[in-house]
Amino acid sequence: MLESALQKLENARLRDKIEHLTKQLEQTQTQNQQLTRKLARLEHQAKVEKFDAIETALKSLIASGHIRRCEPNEN
């Protein structure tokens, strides 16, 4: 009888531990998804900013006469 009560207590503790770990896992997965989306946005933003910087630099070089704009050949 005492062993049965101890076993039930241990089982309850294990269930609580499993529930706690399951909640932690769900929270971690949610945070991971949020961070993955944020990383994708930041990567996209960095690409856009890099493109804008290159475009600005090229326009500046063209305006200053350091390079010329090439027109496509008409053959």
Image: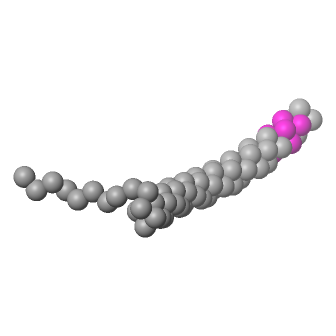
Hey, which quadrant is residue 63 in on the image?
A: bottom left
Q: Decide if residue 19 is in sight here.
A: no
Q: Is residue 35 magenta?
A: no
Rendered image coloring scheme:
one colour
- Which residues fall within the magenta stretch? 6-12
The structure residue drawn at horizontal position 45% and vertical position 60%, both measured from the top left corner, is 61
Q: Is residue 18 left or right of residue 65?
A: right
Principal secondary structure, stretch drawn in magenta:
helix
Q: How many marks?
A: 0
Of residue 16 and residue 58, the one placed in the foreground of this image is: 58
Quadrant assignment for the N terminus: top right
Picture quarter containing residue 73? bottom left
**Image x and y of residue 25, in percent:** 68, 48
Residue 6 in view: yes
Asked whether 38 or 47 is in front, the reply is 47
Which residue is at 43% across, 57% downward?
66
Magenta stretch containing residue 7, yes or no?
yes
Farthest-out residue, bottom: 63
Q: Looking at the picture, does residue 11 appear above or below residue 62? A: above
In the image, farthest residue toward the right: 2
Residue located 7% across and 52% down the image? 75
Closest to the observer, 30 or 44? 44
The extreme left residue here reads 75
Instruction: Please give left or right for residue 42 compared with residue 69 in the image.
Output: right
Q: Nearer the viewer, residue 65 or 20?
A: 65
Q: Would residue 35 be found to the left or right of residue 68 on screen?
A: right
- Residue 64 is situated, as x and y percent measured from the top left of the image, at 46, 64
Q: Residue furthest front?
A: 65
**Image coordinates for residue 9, horizontal then vertical, percent:** 86, 42
